[in-house]
Amino acid sequence: MRCTVFGTGYLGATHAACMAELGHEVIGVDIDAGKVAKLESGEVPFFEPGLREVLRRNLEAGRLSFTTSYEEAAAFADVHFIGVGTPQKSGEFAADLSHVRAVIEALAPLLTRPAVIVGKSTVPVGTAAELAARARDLAPAGDEVEVAWNPEFLREGFAVHDTLKPDRLVVGLERARKGQAERLLRELYADLVSDGVPYIVTDLATAELAKSAANAFLATKISFINAIAEVCEVADADAVELSDILGHDPRIGRRFLDSGLGFGGGCLPKDIRALMARAGELGANQALHFLREVDSINMRRRARMVELTRQTCGGSVLGARIAVLGAAFKPGSDDVRDSPALNVAGQLQLEGAAVTVFDPQAMDNARRVFPTLGYGVGAVEACSGADVVLVLTEWPEFRELDPGEVGRAVRLREVLDGRNCLDRTAWESAGWRYQRLGSTS
Ligand SMILES: NC(=O)c1ccc[n+]([C@@H]2O[C@H](COP(=O)([O-])OP(=O)(O)OC[C@H]3O[C@@H](n4cnc5c(N)ncnc54)[C@H](O)[C@@H]3O)[C@@H](O)[C@H]2O)c1
Ligand SMILES: O=c1ccn([C@@H]2O[C@H](COP(=O)(O)OP(=O)(O)O[C@H]3O[C@H](CO)[C@@H](O)[C@H](O)[C@H]3O)[C@@H](O)[C@H]2O)c(=O)[nH]1
């Protein structure tokens, strides 16, 4: 079958390549000509393990191409996925839907025959119905245009796996029209469904809300354990051991119970805020009030890390040399959107510290967002002359560092483990003072 994917960022490029991997003919469309040129030449414009191989294989097979031309894309297929960004609006909690709306405004007038527009971007509940009405108004094919919502649950770092082996496929359809959208999407995903992936058909609002709810749940789970970690610090308990104990209960589960610096990235923080904003607009102001607390527990982790650094430096970081290992919001990604690590690095620099950052993948993105921070050429080099070393993203490279070697580079052997990822005994045996969030000892 044929399809297009509008937006070729973390989600869209992965979706386009993986749809081609399933045997479909796919065109990826983006307004960023540089990104399109890179993808066309077989280069992924961001770090995502395994994506380059899938991209190249399908470019070579002639099933996949990229363009900036909406005309080309509209003429090519009758199923059009939307995977453009829905960032937080500046100064408010709500989602900025301008990119999604821009796709509809430009694509719909080109739809001269029956077509299905399938949203994958994360949007506030109610968006799809509004877009459907607008698309039908603008399209020459009018009533023959359907909108479906097929939210995406992939994790960065596992994007290819999560797209080809998802936990579930959710397809929200317009209530009055379960026509071609249902049929075409079943056909597109037939191989996944025959592999046993649950395929759940629902209405537009439930599909949109399922995505927001999933991220709100994950954020809540992380903030829950971080709130408990705050108590651990004052009660002389150990947050990591506590997570392990809770995780044995299958009703709770160990995943997403890693306390530490909290959640960041281009999804969880903005999605819980957008969900609160939309619930408020719909009159359910009280329902999600607790998400404010989830958000503030999360932001407090960053403040606590800064405070711990200050304490370690004798009350002030003014003039201190601080090494920050990690810039990406999590390992396995070069994404620095709302990165807790960079946020802490930036705060410490504002307080007068000389901060040197190193990350195995996110250096270019970090430099773009925080050009005034110092950057090292390697983890050990970044620690050169440091008064304190902060490990803020749990890259395997950092877990495997030799504490003896790092110890020879620093001025003082002080390490703060923001992600509970280091082997404490090994660092202490090499003469380091080891501290982390969620424990006083
Ligand atoms: N990143 C993830 O892991 C992930 C996972 C699930 C869902 N999502 C959701 O997917 C959406 C996209 O996220 P992302 O991380 O891929 O964003 P991104 O910023 O990496 O990519 C968005 C892309 O859309 C392009 N674009 C913007 N306007 C366009 C237009 N009018 N026409 C064509 N292309 C246009 C941009 O140039 C960019 O390449 C968001 O709603 C996000 O919440 C993301
Ligand atoms: O126990 C944990 C697990 C995660 N994190 C942090 O939480 C953030 C988000 O991690 P993760 O969810 O793995 O990353 P994303 O790639 O942002 O994926 C989330 O956001 C995507 C976009 O909506 C969804 O598709 C995914 O299902 C959802 O997991 C990162 O900063 C992690 O460091 C913790 O602090 N503790």
Image: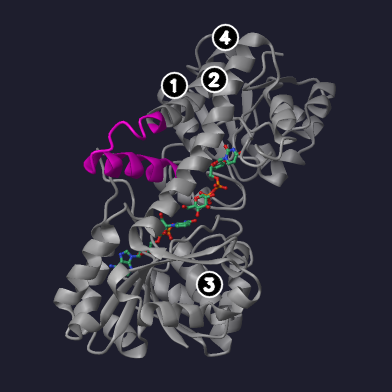
Mark 3 = which residue?
43
Does residue 281 show up magenta in the picture?
yes
Q: Residues within 10 Å of mark 1 (few under 14, many from 20)?
A: some
In space, the residues marked 2 and 4 are separated at their CA atoms by 10 Å
Name the amino acid, label 4: Gly
Left or right of 393 in this view: 220: left
Name the amino acid, label 1: Gly
Question: What span is in magenta?
Answer: 268-291
For the residues bearing labels 1 and 3, Cβ distance under 8 angstroms: no
The residue mark sitting in front, 1 or 3, is: 3
Mark 4 = which residue?
314
Residue 4 in sight from this viewpoint: yes
Name the amino acid, label 2: Ala
The numbered dot on residue 352 is 1
Which residue is situated farthest in the left direction here? 137
Ligand 2 contact, mark 1 (Cβ < 8 Å):
no
Label 1 or label 2, whichever comes before in sequence order: 2
